[in-house]
Image (cartoon, rainbow, N blue to C red):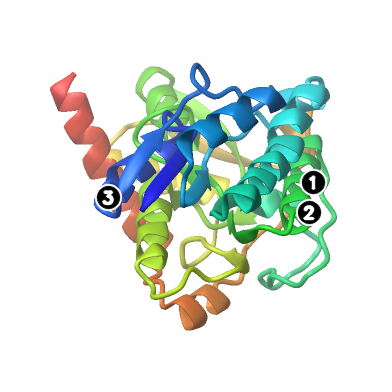
Amino acid sequence: MKILLTGRNGQVGYELERVLSVLGEVIATDRSRLDLAVPDAIRRVVREAKPDLIVNAAAYTAVDRAETEQELARRINGVAPGILAEEARRAGAAIVHFSTDYIFDGNKTAPYVETDPPAPLNVYGQTKLEGERAIAASGARYLILRTSWVYGPRGQNFFLAIARKASTEESLRVVDDQTGAPTTGRFIAESVASILRLEQLPSGIYHLAARGITTWYSFACSIVAKLGLQVSLTPIATKDYPASAARPRYSVLDIRKIESDLHVRLTSWEEQLDWCVRAFREATARA
């Protein structure tokens, strides 16, 4: 199987390149080789690669900056996935794409199921939803995996921000009224590999996230404790934290469908954090 992977340097793409290599030939691209903001570049790269499967791990993920860079966010998150899917259909290939819990407005008090109506609060969520719809309308064989609060031991994410700030500052204020499930890029990548080993690639939309729920504040407390850092953490309300983009108050994803239908082994956010802490320490020791 020949796999075209986008976003190889991202949190999920980095992990995917490693795990997909045992399943076939991986053509891994970054922005320098495939700029998803340029439609002609997408078509050219896909047609040259002639893949059996496209895995789109690239995205515009700067949630606040998307409010002022709407056109760029829309080209990458909304338009590009549709072009990738159209090219997949043209090549007789399938596409795996990643979406987000931020397509929901957060007004529920129980985990969101795949069929709940989306109502994004910010440009990032809107453009990711547009990408979902463009893929679904393409006629391609597709699998869309909605993920949640993605992080890992490299790149730019909440885990690394807390680890860095807790090492240099005496106190931190962290939002405590947004609830979700922190999920590592490693877990997402290994779950995708598990799905690709199935006899037939499933189609449709599935939620893929860690088990359990927490808030950003509680997550930060766990990070600090597991890293053995000494810092004072103060819980605050969203209204007291300045941000350009609105966030859903509750964005927990219901993961029962992917567990029952695709037999994905779901681990808790605490287990995934334990792995991330170990990987972070190993990377720090090597540096």
- Pair 1/3: label in front: 1
Q: Tell me if I can see residue 243 in this picture.
A: no
| 3 or 2: mark nearer the eye | 2
Q: Could you tell me how far apart the alpha carbons at marks 2 and 1 are, in whole angstroms?
A: 5 Å
Q: Secondary structure at mark 2?
A: helix
The residue singled out by tag 1 in the image is: 130
Residue 259 screen position, x and y as percent: 47, 77
200 above or below 39? below
Q: Most extreme residue toward the bottom, as rendered?
A: 260
Q: Which mark, by number, is residue 133?
A: 2
In depth, the one of 90 and 11 nearer the eye is 90
Q: 251 or 131, which lies in front?
A: 131
- Structural crowding at the residue carrying mark 3, measured as other residues with C-alpha within 10 Å and reported as few (<14), some (14–19) or many (≥20): some
Which amino acid type is marked by label 2? Arg
Location of residue 78 by image quarter: top right
The numbered dot on residue 275 is 3
Quarter of the image with the C terminus in it: top left
